[in-house]
Image (tube, rainbow, N blue to C red):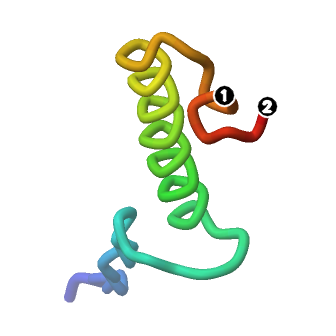
Amino acid sequence: MTNATTAKVTTPVVEDRNAWRWGFTPQAEIWNGRLAMIGFLAAVLIELFSGQGFLHFWGIL
């Protein structure tokens, strides 16, 4: 007789890194970074095409 050992194999839980989740989660930080990059790009494009700063463009300064 052979003494065969059985090992319980479980598959790892994979989280969707693009899911929209609230709180201090890696998904929320990824979305925060993406939206910040879009906002920064928008401010740069406004300054390039209007010839004035972002705050001057909106009439704040």
Q: Is 33 above or below relative to 17?
A: above
Residue designated by label 2:
61
In the picture, the quarter occupied by the N terminus is bottom left
Q: Secondary structure at mark 1?
A: helix
Residue 19, relative to residue 29: is it above or below?
below
Element on which disc 2 rests: loop
Q: Amino acid at mark 2?
A: Leu
- Residue 27: percent from left, percent from top: 51, 65
Q: What residue type is disc 1 on?
A: His
Left or right of 49 in this view: 25: right
Give the residue at mark 1.
56
Residue drawn at (55%, 44%), measured in percent from left and top? 36
In which quadrant of the rendered view does residue 20 lie? bottom left
Mark pair 1, 2: CA separation: 5 Å
Pick the front one: 46 or 59: 59
Q: Is residue 5 left or right of residue 54?
A: left
Most extreme residue toward the left, as rendered? 1
Q: Residue visible at 23% across and 82% down?
A: 2
Picture layout, residue 61 above or below residue 23: above
Viewport quadrant of the C terminus: top right
Percent of width and height locating residue 49: 35, 17
